[in-house]
Image: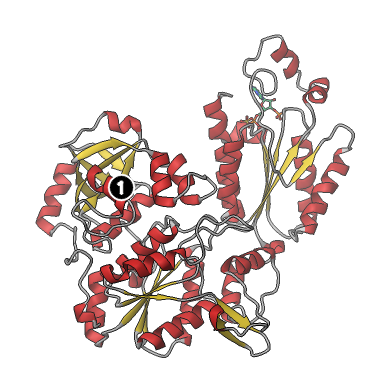
């Protein structure tokens, strides 16, 4: 098979970018159209649609294609297509829209990206979609979680006319379209190209695997790392790209291209593997690597949503129809005695082997533990450690939560002064009262306003953590879902330690330093936490401290001991 023969999926490479005159006209028209601001996922989909990486799609799916994709992994016209590519909107926007109308799709800053002509609109059936796409309704699967909690209530489908690709200021030279990449193959005379999609850094086993794939296929390599949305908690794309740039020096010269893929990964295992192959085909790949556990969520422990070879089986079943040769490799294991890697099915029985998954390396980096050279390259470890230094140098948020009067502020203040005494990182105290005076003065204690307040605290703490400082927060933060949201935003940048100050209501009420419980009991304050407003007890905080029989200094000592154990101080 040669590159000249590799036709795009559906035979034609789509290009949805309007020409200059049409774009000018669309800009004028867009001024009088309803606006839809796109989220990150939608911007990724729009970009892949626009550049033809999602050929033959010409816009967000209409209902008949969507249902056909869910039921039989094909568009209505029979073309193989594994995953929905849909435009979701909230119910409120849906009320003001109808089929036949056009809408202006804008980036979060209001910049016009495309005009979409709506052909139909239908309610999202989340559970059905979850079952058919992900094979599960379990929200522990990040793709299902997103579908159940974040996708809007309606889908709108219809063709797109793209005025501008989403703006990127980073790595512009590494963001080529399928047509541009095909042009490079032509120029370099590449006829056989093996595609490799990844959302993790390339450690030793992946490097060995790609090198063997190149040799077996007699092909050059196209590395397509996701620079869109990956798995929650993955290394950010800046860190990964710094790592890729180090690793690619180890391939023979002029045998690879590194190109960023603005894909929002769904982690849909076998179905997603087919999508990667189709994208690869559109980028002109003749071969495509489908690894062990391809496109599966990283699950610590036993839970797995797909069998390790499930994606490979499905890829092999459809590879012929897609027209890409599947390179389905077994897991690579390290043989310490021989000091080499081998595929799991080529290891003689009784031979000692070791393996480190990407997740193992991620855990070691975050906890500051040593990584052996057989697992990854020293330059990769150095690069990862620059982004994720050991816990002692990482940013950190200590988040106290609990009832009014539980002792949060006192503990937070003592901890604040301990950190100031240590003096190794800048430290900020975001006590409930300070925040209410400075950041959230206009907010009440309604559910909605408490959420805004706690998310604001979370945002400030995440910025501090990102910049390697220490944030100490001490709001009541009564709702579990909001605390979980704050945790996930902060853990993307550093440590998060939730301390439930679990002093019981009776004790808080007995203390009643501000006299507010008395007022709440007398009905003078409405919606007081613990009296006539709920406090959802944290299910798995890092620490739970009841201050009834502890002095504040003793309570803080427990926090410091915990932080010491985890290497943060
Ligand atoms: S929240 O729920 O996280 O937004 O609350 P927070 O910003 O931490 O503010 C809690 C302090 O505000 C005082 N206060 C109330 N608390 C609970 N419910 C109601 N309705 C209320 N009205 C005022 C209260 O004194 C809290 O102070 P702390 O420092 O927690 O004792």
Task: Name the spot of residue 112 as percent of width and height, x first.
Answer: 25, 48
Task: Name the spot of residue 350 as percent of width and height, x first.
Answer: 68, 82
**Residue 506 figure quarter:** top right
- Which residue is identified by label 1? 86
Q: Is residue 443 visible?
A: no
Q: Residue furthest top?
A: 522
Quarter that holds the N terminus: bottom left
Task: Name the spot of residue 430 as percent of width and height, x first.
Answer: 66, 41
Left or right of 369? Residue 171 is left
The residue shown at (22%, 56%) is: 57
Classify 404 as above or below 196: above
Rendered image coloring scheme = secondary structure
Question: Dividing the image into four equal quarters, which quarter contains ligand 1?
Answer: top right
Task: Name the spot of residue 272 as percent of width and height, x first.
Answer: 39, 60
Q: Nearer the viewer, residue 187 or 283?
A: 283
**Residue 285 figure quarter:** bottom left
Secondary structure at badge 1 equals: loop
Tag count: 1
The residue shown at (42%, 55%) is: 266
Q: Residue furthest left?
A: 21
Respond yes or no on whether mark 1 lies under 8 Å from ligand 1: no
């Amino acid at each position: 098979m040669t590159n000249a023969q590799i036709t795009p999926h559906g035979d034609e490479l789509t290009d949805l970018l309007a020409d200059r005159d049409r774009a000018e006209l669309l800009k004028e028209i867009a001024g009088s159209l309803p606006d839809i601001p796109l989220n990150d996922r939608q911007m990724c989909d729009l970009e892949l649609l626009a550049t033809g990486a999602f050929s033959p799609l010409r816009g967000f799916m209409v209902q008949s294609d969507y249902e056909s994709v869910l039921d039989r992994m094909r568009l209505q016209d029979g073309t193989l297509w594994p995953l929905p590519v849909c435009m979701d909107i909230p119910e409120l926007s849906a009320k003001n829209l109808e089929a036949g109308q056009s809408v202006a799709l804008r980036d979060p800053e209001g910049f016009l990206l495309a005009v979409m002509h709506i052909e139909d609109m239908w309610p999202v059936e989340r559970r059905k979609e979850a079952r058919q796409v992900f094979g599960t309704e379990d929200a522990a699967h990040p793709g299902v979680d997103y579908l159940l909690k974040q996708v809007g209530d309606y889908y709108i489908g219809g063709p797109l006319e793209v005025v501008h690709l989403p703006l990127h200021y980073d790595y512009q030279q590494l963001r080529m379209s399928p047509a541009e990449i095909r042009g490079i193959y032509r120029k370099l005379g590449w006829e056989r190209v093996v595609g490799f999609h990844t959302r993790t850094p390339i450690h030793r086993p992946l490097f060995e695997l790609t090198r063997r794939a190149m040799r077996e296929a007699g092909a050059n390599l196209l590395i397509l790392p996701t620079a869109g949305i990956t798995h929650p908690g993955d290394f950010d794309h800046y860190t990964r790209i710094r790592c890729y740039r180090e690793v690619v020096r180890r391939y023979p010269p002029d045998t690879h291209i590194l190109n960023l893929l603005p894909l929002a990964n769904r982690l849909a295992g076998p179905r997603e593997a087919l999508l990667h192959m189709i994208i690869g085909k559109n980028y002109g790949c003749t071969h495509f690597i489908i690894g062990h556990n391809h496109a599966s969520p990283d699950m610590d422990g036993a839970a797995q949503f797909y069998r390790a070879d499930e994606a490979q089986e499905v890829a092999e079943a459809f590879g012929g129809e897609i027209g890409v040769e599947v390179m389905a490799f077994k897991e690579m294991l390290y043989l310490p005695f021989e000091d080499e890697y081998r595929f799991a099915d080529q290891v003689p029985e009784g031979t000692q082997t070791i393996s480190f998954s990407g997740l193992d390396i991620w855990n070691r980096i975050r906890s500051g533990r040593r990584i052996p050279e057989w697992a990854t390259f020293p330059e990769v470890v150095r690069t990862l450690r620059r982004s994720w230094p050991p816990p002692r140098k990482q940013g950190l948020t200590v988040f106290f939560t609990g009832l009014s009067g539980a002792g949060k502020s006192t503990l937070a203040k003592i901890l604040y002064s301990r950190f100031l005494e240590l003096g190794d990182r800048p430290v900020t105290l975001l006590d409930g009262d300070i925040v209410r005076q400075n950041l959230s003065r206009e907010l009440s204690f309604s559910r909605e306003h408490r959420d805004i307040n706690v998310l604001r605290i979370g945002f400030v703490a995440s910025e501090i953590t990102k910049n390697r400082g220490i944030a100490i927060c001490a709001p009541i933060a009564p709702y579990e879902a909001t605390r979980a949201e704050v945790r996930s935003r902060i853990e993307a940048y550093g440590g998060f330690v939730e301390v439930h100050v679990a002093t019981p209501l009776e004790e808080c009420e007995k203390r009643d330093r501000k006299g507010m419980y008395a007022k709440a009991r007398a009905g003078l304050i409405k919606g007081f936490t613990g009296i006539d407003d709920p406090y959802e007890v944290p299910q798995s905080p890092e620490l739970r401290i009841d201050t009834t029989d502890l002095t504040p200094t003793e309570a803080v000592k427990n926090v410091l001991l915990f932080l010491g154990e985890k290497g943060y101080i």
